[in-house]
Image (tube, rainbow, N blue to C red):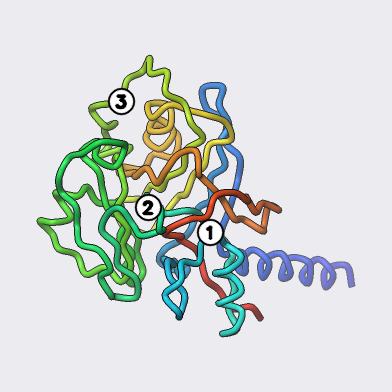
Amino acid sequence: MIRGVVAIAALMCAVAGAARAVECRDIDHAGLSYTACEVDAAQETLSLFLYDGDGVPYGQFGNVDRALERTGRMLSFAMNAGMYHDNRAPVGHYIEDGEEIRGVVTSAGPGNFGLLPNGVFCLRAGRADVIETGAYMARSPRCEDATQSGPMLVIDGALHPRFLPDSTSRYVRNGVGTSSDGARAVFVISNQPVTFHEFGRLFRDVLELPNALYFDGNISRLYAPGIGRNDLGFWLGPIVGVVESAE
């Protein structure tokens, strides 16, 4: 009887673990706190969201979740995913469901987006990749979804060359890093203001990801119901999320 109870308990734990699409945890590094949410891109459905069926920007995680609910699906995780203009249109390259909404921007410019090299977060069947923009143009990958942002945080294992260890520019920041095989995507938001150098080091030295991309700062938001987190604030442009069945 005891063996039966133990076996059932073990099975329930296994099922619960298998059902968890995203693993989120807090990480402390160099006296700073971050929340990291890891997604198995080979198993889970990562998607980008910008406009609803009427062409109106979703703007908030709840609007995306309600739209998915009508099709029997739900968000199990979401994060803002790239810089945008006042009308919520993306600053850089953007593809959703195979449709290109904005082409690749290759020129340098003011602001963090123009702090080259920047990069593209590319979603394809069974994988997710952060690709430096020049390499993206050379490879021309067929992304089902893609969002361009900048600067790159980590490029082939090296920090962005413009990052300064003694920088005084601090913001709450968020971004994503991916493994070389595209199976592992880790989304991170800082829990207090950090510098680019500190943020990049987390991806390189702690998460050990060869490529990582900055999404934004100050407006950074996270939706992770598994840990009871649903950040409210500014209306957003591009949103990245994990979609699963609501059943």
Work out whether residue 237 or residue 225 is closer to the camera in this orientation and state it: 237
Q: Are marks 3 and 1 in contact (CB under 8 Å)?
A: no
Residue 126 in picture, x, y percent from top left: 36, 69
Marks 1 and 2, how far apart at CA: 17 Å
Residue 230: x and y in percent read 65, 54
Residue 70 location in percent, x, y?
60, 83
Name the foreground residue: 41 vs 34. Answer: 34
Q: Position of 58 compared to 169: left or right?
A: right
Which residue sits at x=30%, y=53%? 91
| Badge 2 amino acid | Tyr
Name the residue: 63% across, 78% down: 246
| Tag 1 residue | 78
- The residue carrying pointer 3 sits among few (fewer than 14), some (14 to 19) or many (20 or more) residues within 10 Å by Cα, namely some
Q: Which residue is mark 3?
A: 163
> What amino acid does circle 1 point to?
Ala
Name, please, the residue furthest toward the top: 166
Q: Secondary structure at mark 3?
A: loop
> Helix, strand, or loop for circle 2?
loop
Circle 2 or circle 3, nearest the eye: 2
The amino acid sitting under disc 3 is Phe
> Could you classify mark 1 by the number of other residues whose Cα lies within 10 Å: few (under 14), some (14-19), or many (20 or more)?
many
What residue is shown with label 2? 84
- In the rendered view, tell whether residue 111 sits above or below residue 178: above
Between marks 2 and 3, how big is the CA–CA gap? 23 Å
